Amino acid sequence: MFEWIDEHRVGHQLHSLSGTLHSHLGWIEFDAGRPAQARAACTEALTSARLIGDPLLEVRSLDKLSMLAVERRRPWEALAAATAAEHLAQTHGGPRVRSVVALRLARALSSAGDHAGARRALSLALTWHDRSDKDTDAPRWTAFAGQVEVDYATAVWHVETGHPVHAIPFLRSAVNRLGPTYGRNAALYRARLAEVLMKAGEVEEACTEASASADAAQGMTSARLVTRLRTVATSAELIDTASTRDFLERMRELGVTTKKGRPA
């Protein structure tokens, strides 16, 4: 009897560890530009969560699966995963978990074309964020969540509704709030800011932010970052000014190519 209880407890702990590791792996594969591997890792995490009945690990896995589905342009899958995570979070999650899930739901709704629903989800995320200061039981994987993520998600919503100019102050706020602690995210967000500035016609500022992102990211490996810098470089290639020429030269030094396949 006692031997079975021991084995049961060890099995539970191993599945919990496996789920956590696969969740981390899913994010690493996603950042490396390997979506199929990322999805497989997140699916493994979800399986482990369900085997041991860990609802918060399941929320974490569904959250990442929704994010991946958005990137792969599978809006129905993104919305289904985010909705399932929301249902679990209503019963098992505190304010911080619910804020994270609401942000993911907003992104999924927007990818499905429901921008009004996405706006409501963003408002809900902010409401839960405002209540999260006393959320002492929040799981460690929600540590990234906060005003930065709310600002970034709001910026994405503005871009997707066709108002890149309105997104710029939110992206600037997100970049400024990150500070030196989250260097990888800061570089990614700054590159995203450069993309949006370019869309808004602010060419010189876009080149400045993209260069700052590239400089901050030296030594990092991120397919997502390279893709964003390549997008800015491709747009800059069409504009012959001193600032774009300097920027393209800097990108060439870093080995960033344009989408046409030529060195930037």
Image: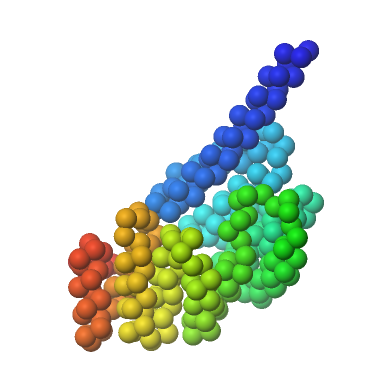
Which residue appears at 65% of the width and 44% of the height? 57
Q: Which image quarter holds the C terminus? A: bottom left
Estimate the x, y position of residue 147 in percent, counting from the top left.
61, 69
Q: Please say whether residue 8 is visible from this viewpoint.
A: yes
Image spot of residue 11 (x, y percent):
65, 25
Q: Nearer the viewer, residue 175 or 191?
A: 175
Q: Residue at x 38, y 86 (%)?
A: 202
Q: Is residue 243 positioned above or below 101 on the image? A: below
Q: How many marks?
A: 0
Where, quadrant-wise, is the N terminus in this rendering? top right
127 and 227: which is toward the camera: 127
* Residue 123 x %, y %: 70, 73
Is 76 located above or below residue 167 in the figure?
above
Q: Residue at x 46, y 64 (%)?
A: 180
Describe residue 204's horizontal placement relative to residue 130 as left or right.
left
Q: Is residue 22 left or right of residue 46?
A: left
Q: How is the image coloured?
A: rainbow
Q: Position of residue 77 (x, y in %)?
A: 59, 55
Residue sitting at x 58%, y 58%: 144
Q: Is residue 87 visible?
A: no
163 is higher (above) or lower (below) than 121? below
- In the image, taking residue 88 as reference, residue 154 lies left or right, namely left
